[in-house]
């Protein structure tokens, strides 16, 4: 169980990092300015929510792909 949670947490963190860098490329050049804007607008939670919705979509596709692969593996045996 811990192994699964660790794997999903790594996927979520990687997804969060990729989305942050895609949506806000200035995070690489001026991270303090971007964090200052977040503090000014008090929108700390939106990156986590956006990532959670994208994670749900990715999780759904992973589940469907796993189901299909499992179906073909059982059919071949």
Image (cartoon, rainbow, N blue to C red):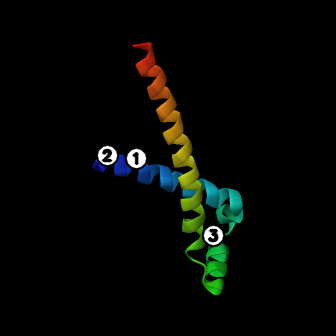
Using residue 58 as the reference point, say whether residue 28 is left or right of it.
right
Picture layout, residue 53 above or below residue 5: below
Q: CA distance from mark 3 to mark 1?
A: 27 Å
Tell me which label, 3 or 1, sits earlier in the chain.
Answer: 1
- Mark 2 or 3: the one toward you: 2
The residue at 40%/47% (across/down) is: 7
Tell me which label, 2 or 3, sits earlier in the chain.
Answer: 2
Q: CA distance from mark 2 to mark 3?
A: 32 Å
Q: For the residue carrying disc 3, how many other residues have a C-alpha within 10 Å: few (<14), some (14-19), or many (20+)?
A: few
Q: For the residue carrying disc 2, how many other residues have a C-alpha within 10 Å: few (<14), some (14-19), or many (20+)?
A: few
Question: Disc 2 on helix, strand or loop?
Answer: helix
Residue 44, given in percent of the width and then of the height, sits at 56, 77
Residue at which label 1 appears: 7
The residue at 44%/14% (across/down) is: 76
Residue at which label 3 appears: 31
Question: Disc 3 on helix, strand or loop?
Answer: helix
Residue at which label 2 appears: 3
Q: Which mark is residue 44?
A: none
Picture layout, residue 12 above or below residue 47: above
Q: For the residue carrying disc 1, how many other residues have a C-alpha within 10 Å: few (<14), some (14-19), or many (20+)?
A: few
Q: CA distance from mark 2 to mark 1?
A: 6 Å
Does the CB distance between marks 3 and 1 fall below 8 Å?
no
Locate the C terminus by quadrant. top left
Question: Disc 1 on helix, strand or loop?
Answer: helix
Does the CB distance between marks 2 and 1 fall below 8 Å?
yes
How many discs appear? 3
The residue at 56%/47% (across/down) is: 58
Q: Nearer the viewer, residue 55 or 14?
A: 55
């Amino acid at each position: 169980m811990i192994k699964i949670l660790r794997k999903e947490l790594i996927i979520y963190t990687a997804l969060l990092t990729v989305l942050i860098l895609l949506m806000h490329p200035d995070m690489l050049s001026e991270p303090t300015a971007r964090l200052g804007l977040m503090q000014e607008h008090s929108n700390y939670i939106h990156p986590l929510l956006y990532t959670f919705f994208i994670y749900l979509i990715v999780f759904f596709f992973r589940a469907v792909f796993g189901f299909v692969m499992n179906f073909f593996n059982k059919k071949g045996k």
